[in-house]
Amino acid sequence: MKLLGTLFSAAALLVAAMPAETKGAPPTMAQLGTHELFIGTCYQPVDRSKEQIISDVAVMKQAGLKVVRMGDLSWEYFEPADGRFDFAPFDFAMDRMAAAGIKVILDIPGTPAPLWAHQAYPGITLIGESGTPLHPAERYMDDISDPDFRRLQLRLADRVTKRYARHPAVIAVGYSNEIGNGYLSYSPATRQRFIAWLQKRYGNLDALNKAWAGQRWSRTVSDWQQVQLPYASGPGPSERYLDLRRFWSSVTIDLLRDLDAVRRANMPDKPSLSNLYDAASRRGFDYLSTQSDYQNYGAFGYYSSDPVDGAFLAMMMKGQLPTPIWFNEFQTGFFGDYGTRGKSRMIVYLGLAYGGQGFLAWTFNSHLGAEEQIYFGLLDHDGTPSWKLAELSRVASEFETLESLGFPRPVQPKIALSYSFESKVLADRKELKLYYRTPYMEHKLNAFGPIYDDNIDAAVVNLGASDLSRYKLLVIAGEYLMDPPSVEAVRNFVKQGGTAIMTAYSAKADATGQWYGTALPGGLSDVFGLRTGEFYKRSELLTGTIAGSTFSTTINNYEVLEPSTARVLGRFTNLDGPPVATVNSYGKGQAIYVAVTAQPSVMKPLYRSLYEQLGIVRGPDTPKGVVAREVEGRTLYINTSAEPAAVQIAGHRKGRTSGKMWDGVLRLEGYGVDLLE
């Protein structure tokens, strides 16, 4: 508690600030070095007076915070009127950070655009599906496909990056916070851009009509101007909806590529490190197949209530990038939730287990106004530091030791799980729910959960855009849509000696969103050595054996497998003998098909039957809720549960984090952590 009593007096310790554009030796990406950890916070100087900024920076320095993320959501702060830039307020904050030795992720604002932009350039304002203008009532309500929006956004990025290119505080650049969480627009101009995108994609109307099944129900397009923007909320066929989401994904990715081109022109020595929220349901975009075009470090906001979900998203943000993960935001509290003691520290250590390097709390000061005034940060609304700041200060102190003990932890998974933006947006559409009953992400997390519980690293990849040769085991869970590059990638992976597991509801639709007209799984029936057509849902649970272990299901859907060259791995015991799983030899590898929706009771025994033959080593044995990883001969344990946990360990071990000695049993309090040696 001594920290809380002295933080405010720390302002007097700050040295005089340097000019904003001080020249010096240009920083390099080495500042995010392989043996450095960062703990910090997101900070919005737009909300703070000069006096508050001075005090805030002193508090951060005293707490040991090393980095802040600033600039996001603050376009008007830099450009209060069209073409009139005022950097003086942000200069002040930047200079104070530099003087205190606190590094800055310079987050270039994008959405929301200022009101003056909506007034001067009406094309930026959204139009709803009904044709009604949607004024910017909340953040992200901009049409990012509008040429004026893009021009203004890139102009701002150019001015900001040029101004701070040599500022000593800057270590990285981010773009347009949560750009994936925006809205779709239905303006006439957007419709014309959609038509132009279709013309480029398909070339002619014959190809478009084939992809869209135009012959069905008199919907043949005989003139490009007959094309309307598909309704995102329905009704309408899947093929057109899929292309609508692809169009907006393309719009988003093109803008990110343009922003990265600005960074590379003006700040080539600073890496990109953006919180993009690609999985947002409102718009989203195909991040995994394009991440290396605009992202040097995988980064995201951790707001998961379930650590399994959080770990999966962390690995999805990493994809195949060679760099550590950054938690550009993680919750210290939440909406209407002041926070839980120990939980923020647990999230940081969970991130360390999965290869995290930087962790920034959302947010520093609790906001007095607007939509997030009941979101509680490190400082209370009256500016008093909370226990949450003391908790992060403890982490900052612990990081000083961990940096010399193998952190950030290198992650080199031998297992990969598939994820597809296109498959997700199609499978989660309400029109498909009568068939694809389990939400897309539930398929993924059910497949990932047993690997998580076995404390094994796993990558999350886009099948058609990734180097699958890195992996020994590939898990394709409920991947409803599989396009030709994905099909070919799986075929080659197995042919070259890999082991692939595919679960029910996979490879049903092709690249157009139409069902395959060939034996299922589409394009891969010969690889898996079977055909599947019939499918059923039971009210009773399913039971059976797989890999010599018995199971019962919690999701009671199944497909009827008709093996040709595949052999049976296990059968249902309360059905009339159909296989629950088969395995087929193909090339140098093997392809396993599971007849049920991915779920831990089935996937766990299947995985464990494969580990030894694939040379995959399970991590430390832990009770449910405890995550563990080996790091340079030591073992990091994280209790992700609020309840205490007892972990069996071998012999006498010293806790580097706790300072305690443990004999045979490690006892972790709720959300407790320790690094044993």
Image: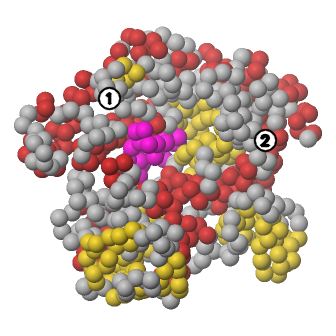
The magenta span reads 271-296
Numbered disc 1: secondary structure: loop
Q: Is residue 632 in sight in this rendering?
A: no
Quadrant of the image for the C terminus?
A: bottom right
Q: Position of residue 247 (x, y in %)?
A: 29, 39
* Residue at 17% in and 34% down: 227
Assess disc 1: are there few (<14), some (14-19) or many (≥20) residues with their C-alpha within 10 Å of its C-alpha: some
The reply to whether the C-beta atoms of the residues labelled 2 and 1 are less than 8 Å apart is: no
Q: Amino acid at mark 1?
A: Glu
* Magenta stretch prevailing secondary structure: loop
| Relative height, residue 309 to residue 85 (above, below) | below
The residue tagged 1 is 129
Is residue 123 toward the left or the right of residue 167 in the image? left
Q: Is residue 452 in sight in this rendering?
A: yes
Q: Earlier in the sequence, mark 2 or mark 1?
A: 1
Is residue 602 toward the left or the right of residue 670 in the image? left
Q: 529 or 196: nearer the eye?
A: 529
